[in-house]
Image (tube, rainbow, N blue to C red):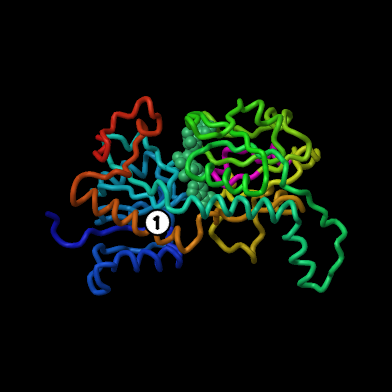
């Protein structure tokens, strides 16, 4: 039985996070918040870990930097749990965390939000909606330069056929597209046509990434894989920025090999995404070059951002923390062994160590 309220240091807090977590934390009655949550604007990093002093858990998001140094410091301060309020955990040194501090995550909050955003980006890009919107705002009703192409009958190559990838496949089928896919662990009896990566590069008119970032697939889209692609291919990335070698992508667009890029994630996003730099000179020349291109659309890691997803993120994160401290069991715990299914020795709904 725990004494008093658990204290949580909530890093990289935004207004929309706070709104959903306040509701979720007060679900037992508004005067009866279960957790004492300290909302911090700062990201968790080697410079800010001290803000978690006296806390039982830290709650973090995609761009907090939980490296081995931060993990050691959190352990020294008595923090017991890293609660990710996202699905991916590539920003946590989970191998270093093993045996020291437990890590929980939100494996799914709204796969529809991300899959629908991927299609929104694709349609915006190929039908030039981003251009048309600005033109008609300025009473420019010319159609020159706005010619798009039909999705119907085109081939989409989906990399990663998990929760989000499968929904994206269904959406694409609704548009009459032919779907081919690559997954390291293909789903049996799914009715999905799995192909090798090389075949996917060669056959796809549109390529959409829906797999996690690992050491093995970092920069899977690079100059070599782009050489194998069709001229004019559209690349969509709503997964993790480092799946694409961005400098090679810029080159591919300049060479007119890549027809368009729809990017909700960017490999150097942690320095800029989620902040307002509209009155600043951005120092990242690669990002500036990308944004300057008429056939590139960048959104700042917003694919997850729906009311439904935010509510689910808050509910699952707080439930994870509750389960971990109250029952000792948490179905959503992750460790580096879980990341490799063949090594995973976690018995269902038990702690990883
Ligand atoms: P999931 O775990 O349900 O599915 C991932 C799929 O990728 C699995 O089928 C797995 O077998 C496959 N996979 C693993 N390694 C692979 C590899 N090397 N090559 C090809 N396939 C591989 O995950 P999900 O919920 O569908 O999420 C997919 C990704 O979307 C996440 O890893 C995360 O990076 C990203 N994501 C982005 C946002 C956003 O807001 N932009 C939000 C949520 C998730």
> Can the viewer see residue 215 in this picture?
no
- Label 1 belongs to which residue? 313
Query: In the rendered image of this protein, does residue 36 appear above or below residue 114?
Result: below
For the point 58% across and 54% down, the residue is 117
Give the residue at x 70% y 53%. Answer: 291
**What span is colored magenta in the figure?**
236-250
Residue 264: x and y, percent?
59, 51
Label 1 C-beta lies within 8 Å of the nearest ligand 1 atom: no
Relative to the observer, which residue lies in front, 348 or 339? Answer: 348
Query: What residue sits 45% from the left and 64% below the top?
Result: 14
| Image position of 197 with respect to 307: above or below | above
Taking 319 as reference, is 205 left or right?
right
The quadrant in which the C terminus is found is: top left
Q: Nearer the viewer, residue 143 or 180?
A: 180
Residue 213: x and y in percent read: 51, 37
Secondary structure type for disc 1:
helix
Q: Is residue 284 visible?
A: yes
Looking at the image, how many numbered discs can be counted on the residues?
A: 1
Q: Does the magenta segment cover residue 245?
A: yes
Q: Is residue 315 above or below residue 342?
A: below
Give residue 246's position: percent from left, percent from top.
65, 41
Between 2 and 72, the one lying in front of the other is 2
Tell me the quarter of the picture where residue 181 sits: top right
Q: Position of residue 118 (x, y in %)?
A: 60, 50
Residue appearing at x 40%, y 33% in the figure: 339
Quadrant for the N terminus in the image = bottom left
Residue 199 is left or right of residue 17, and the answer is right
Residue 89 lies within the magenta run: no
Classify 10 Å Cα crowding around label 1: few (below 14), some (14-19), many (20 and above).
many
């Amino acid at each position: 039985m725990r004494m008093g309220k658990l204290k949580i240091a909530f890093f990289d807090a935004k207004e929309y996070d706070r709104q959903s977590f306040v509701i979720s934390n007060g679900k037992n009655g508004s005067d009866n918040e279960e957790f004492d949550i300290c909302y911090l604007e700062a990201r968790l990093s080697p410079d800010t870990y001290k803000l978690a002093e006296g806390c039982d858990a830290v709650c973090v998001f995609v761009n907090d930097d939980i490296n081995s140094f931060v993990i050691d410091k959190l352990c020294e301060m008595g923090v017991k749990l890293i609660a990710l309020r996202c699905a991916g955990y590539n920003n946590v040194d989970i191998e270093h965390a093993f045996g020291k501090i437990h890590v929980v995550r939100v494996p799914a909050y709204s796969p529809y939000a991300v899959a629908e955003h991927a299609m929104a980006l694709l349609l915006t890009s190929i039908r030039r909606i981003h251009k048309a919107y600005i033109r008609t705002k300025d009473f420019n009703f010319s159609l020159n330069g706005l010619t798009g192409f039909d999705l119907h009958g085109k081939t989409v190559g989906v990399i990663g056929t998990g929760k989000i990838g499968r929904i994206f496949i269904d959406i694409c089928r609704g548009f009459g597209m032919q779907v081919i896919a690559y997954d390291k662990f293909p789903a049996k009896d799914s009715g999905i046509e799995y192909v090798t990566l090389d075949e996917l590069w060669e056959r796809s008119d549109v390529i959409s990434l829906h797999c996690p970032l690992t050491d093995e697939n970092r920069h899977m889209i690079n100059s070599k894989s782009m050489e194998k692609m069709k001229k004019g291919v559209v690349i969509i990335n709503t997964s993790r920025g480092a799946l694409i070698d961005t400098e090679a992508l810029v080159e591919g667009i300049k060479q007119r090999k890549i027809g368009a890029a729809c990017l909700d994630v960017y490999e150097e996003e942690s320095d800029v995404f989620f902040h307002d730099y509209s009155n600043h000179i951005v120092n990242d020349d690669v990002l500036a070059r990308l944004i300057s291109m008429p056939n590139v659309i960048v959104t700042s890691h917003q694919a997850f951002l729906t009311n439904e997803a935010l509510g689910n993120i808050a509910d699952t994160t707080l439930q994870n923390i509750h389960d971990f401290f109250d029952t000792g069991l948490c179905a959503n715990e992750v460790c580096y062994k879980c990341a490799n299914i063949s090594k995973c020795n976690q018995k269902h709904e038990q702690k990883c160590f």
